[in-house]
């Protein structure tokens, strides 16, 4: 009887198991999401999918099946620049600037639909958050200056810095997992990989991460966003044949996803489950863009990943 492949279960076991292990201090200590420990836990979690890929690679090298060379493994998992380097570079540039633009577009769309109240004149929500962070202390920078710095960073610097931990996720989710699931068909592979990606965030989202008002319901809500944004990252990966545009896009989104909080009105705080790029409005916007991209610029299924 032929052996059932264990590469997928092994990858998921390592990625999910180590992510929960990294988050244990938050749960055992009952730390709040505002704790200084939370960003550290998040960064550690982001490298667990890469450890899953490495575990699969080590397992494959121990099997009796023919071994894949390092060069071929790198190509199959997206570490090269793909078959057309110029295309990959262009997509990398679009992935750098696209997510901040989409984050702004989601805010504008949310406001236009009456789902978000913005306060661009007083930046009252930003002021309230600054006061809460350091009660009674003067602001180191005026909120308007801080917003300008944040926006400039999100467009010019942060995507590169954030791409370092983003690679830890993307080599696993889009580099290895998505091609591994492509025999299901493109849309099924995107859906399944997006659900897996969203569920992997559970050590944080079950505590209300990204949607504090929802509590544990933040976990399924974030799955919706992960399917939508994961499909966009998946298109970048499949169309370029490289994981690097997805890495940059992930880093850029992490740099700009919080824009909605900077421009909100403290008297009418944004409903983060609805407004902004990570809310339902943003997910719908991302889904519409993906539908156009996959229709106008279809992708070719990559070759199966060998051991």
Image (cartoon, rainbow, N blue to C red):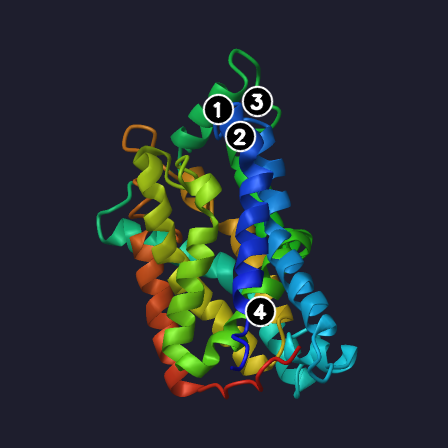
Percent position of residue 270, x then y: 32, 39
In front: mark 4 or mark 3? 4
Instruction: Kindly check if marks 4 and 3 are in contact, taking CB atoms under 8 A apart as contact.
Output: no
The residue where tag 3 is placed is 139
Instruction: Kindly check if marks 2 and 3 are in contact, taking CB atoms under 8 A apart as contact.
Output: no
Q: CA distance from mark 2 to mark 3?
A: 30 Å
In front: mark 1 or mark 4? 4
In percent of the image, x 42 and y 74: which residue is there?
189
Foreground pick, 4 / 95: 4
The residue where tag 2 is placed is 26
Q: CA distance from mark 1 to mark 4?
A: 34 Å
Which of marks 4 and 1 precedes in the sequence? 4
Q: CA distance from mark 1 to mark 3?
A: 30 Å
Which of marks 2 and 4 precedes in the sequence? 4
In percent of the image, x 66 and y 57: which residue is there?
51
- 94 in relation to 136, above or below: below
The residue where tag 1 is placed is 30
């Amino acid at each position: 009887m032929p052996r059932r492949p264990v590469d997928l279960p092994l990858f998921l076991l390592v990625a999910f198991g180590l992510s929960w292990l990294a988050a244990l201090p938050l749960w055992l200590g009952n730390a709040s999401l505002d704790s200084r420990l939370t960003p550290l836990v998040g960064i550690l979690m982001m490298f667990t999918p890469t450890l899953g890929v490495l575990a699969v690679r080590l397992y494959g090298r121990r099997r009796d099946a023919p071994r894949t060379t390092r060069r071929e493994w790198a190509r199959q998992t997206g570490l090269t620049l793909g078959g057309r380097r110029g295309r990959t570079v262009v997509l990398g540039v679009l992935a750098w600037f696209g997510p901040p633009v989409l984050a702004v577009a989601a805010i504008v769309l949310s406001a236009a639909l009456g789902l978000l109240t913005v306060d661009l004149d007083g930046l009252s929500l930003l002021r309230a958050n600054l006061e809460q962070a350091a009660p009674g202390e003067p602001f180191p920078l005026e909120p308007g200056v801080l917003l300008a710095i944040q926006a400039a960073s999100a467009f010019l610097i942060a995507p590169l810095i954030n791409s370092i931990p983003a690679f830890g996720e993307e080599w696993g989710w889009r580099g290895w997992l998505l091609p591994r699931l492509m025999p299901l068909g493109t849309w099924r592979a995107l859906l399944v990989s997006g659900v897996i990606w969203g569920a992997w965030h559970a050590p944080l989202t079950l505590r209300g991460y990204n949607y504090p008002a929802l509590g544990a319901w933040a976990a399924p809500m974030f799955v919706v966003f992960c399917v939508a944004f994961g499909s966009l990252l998946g298109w970048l990966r499949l169309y370029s044949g490289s994981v690097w545009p997805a890495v940059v896009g992930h880093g850029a989104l992490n740099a700009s996803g919080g824009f909605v909080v900077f421009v909100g009105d403290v008297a009418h705080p944004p409903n983060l489950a609805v407004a902004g790029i990570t809310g339902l409005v943003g997910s719908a916007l991302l889904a519409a863009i993906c539908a156009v991209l996959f229709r106008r610029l279809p992708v070719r299924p990559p070759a199966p990943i060998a051991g």
